[in-house]
Amino acid sequence: MSEDPTPSGTPAAKPPPWNDPFIRSIFFQVLAVAILGYFFYFIFDNTLANMAKSGVSTGFAFLSREAGFGILMSLIDYDETYSYGRTFFVGLLNTAVVAASGIVLATLLGFVLGVARLSNNWLISKLAALYIEIFRNVPLLLQIIFWSVAVFQALPRPDKSLQLGDAFFLNNRGLFLPDPVFGAGFEFVTVAFLIAIAGVYFLKNWARKRQESTGQQFPVLYTSLALLIGLPLIVFLIMGMPLSWEYAKLERFSFVGGANIIPEFMALLWALTMYTAAFIAEIVRSGIQAVSHGQSEAAHALGLRNGPTLRLVIIPQAMRVIIPPLTSQYLNLTKNSSLATAIGYPDLVSVFMGTTLNQTGQAVEIVAMTMAVYLTFSLSISMVMNWYNNRVALVER
């Protein structure tokens, strides 16, 4: 037996602080944070000093001054008499709506193309592959300009609009459609719809637990659709149908009334959707192929057809592979929306970092605010997708 080098009951000597791994790690982390903080302080202080020497004013007082320029599209009340601060929120909302719409549409189209890419039908598979190779290899900026100039600006004049009945009109001024006018009592319909959404959530959880315990499936899809449509419809009828429509009418050279979707928005949304969907399709395809083929064979052995096998067996397992790169595509789409300035869509970069900056000269403040908005959007998307990724992760039992 080897002898204990230390006397019995005597604790081992502690290493000196400079040799303690824990203390060294804390020291270097604090040092790194201090160096980084000093670097940003130096940049900030140097910028303020240079601006003071050049006679450039600093601060955010300019946000309260009158803007004096119009904006083509605004989701909130705005005219030339509003402040520069208002232009910031107008641009922010315009960016948010095109990014959110693009994420939804690109996801739907990308999933369809990804599944079609693996279809046993030769024609469908090749058409999906052709779409992917074309749209993902053409620069996005060129696609945005193409859809804007060659498609939407080439539409006929308002007096020769393409129309569907007396409600929808498409021309080079955009898409004109009926604008809903909500009457008294419509808030109860909204409450009924929210209750229906909560009911669908609980129904889905109940159906999942029921299937896990008994093996019997419940028609969640059709029941959920009936609940989402039926409950608000019943309340809508009870409240006396508190909804009317304002239709667009042609007067002289353009349409008045109704709702208008400007061509710049449609061109940007179309290009972002088509471009990003090509990348999402490849992500979906690789995610499905990452699932073992034995899973499909086992599902078929249990009597499941191709559709239920894909929906209940393959896609749930593929999501753990799909989600991380899908998050990157959502972030890319959000940041790529800043290319809207090329066709005049009034997003945050065009309205706030363009016109507002040119009129006020507050470059540092405006650029910092714009960067903060895109950073907030990106971090919010990442947080939501990371939460969902943890939800769909495989759990070992």
Image (spheres, rainbow, N blue to C red):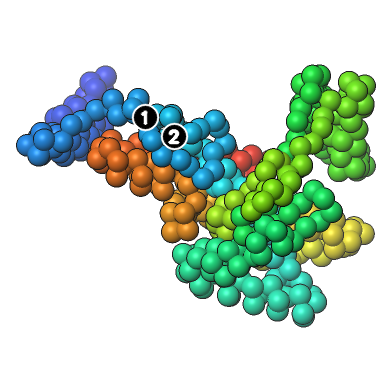
Q: Is residue 229 left or right of residue 289?
A: right
Question: Quick check: can you spot residue 287?
Answer: no
Q: Which residue is mark 1?
A: 66
Label 2: few (<14), some (14–19) or many (≥20) C-alpha neighbours in 10 Å: few
Picture quadrant where residue 187 is located: top right
Of residues 288 and 13, the one drawn nearer to the viewer in this rendering: 288
Residue occupying image coordinates x 56% and y 47%: 98
Q: Which residue is mark 2?
A: 80
Q: Up-down: is 337 above or below 56?
A: below
Contact between marks 1 and 2 (CB within 8 A): the answer is yes
Q: Position of residue 150 (x, y in %)?
A: 57, 70
Q: Up-down: is 131 above or below 267?
A: below
Identify the secondary structure beneath mark 2: loop
Residue occupying image coordinates x 11% and y 35%: 55
Q: Position of residue 4 (x, y in %)?
A: 25, 32
Q: Amino acid at mark 2?
A: Glu
Q: Is residue 255 left or right of residue 5?
A: right
Q: Up-down: is 92 above or below 13?
A: below
Question: Quick check: can you spot residue 204?
Answer: yes
Task: Quadrant for the N terminus, please.
Answer: top left
In the drawing, what numbered circle is on residue 191? none
Identify the secondary structure beneath mark 1: loop
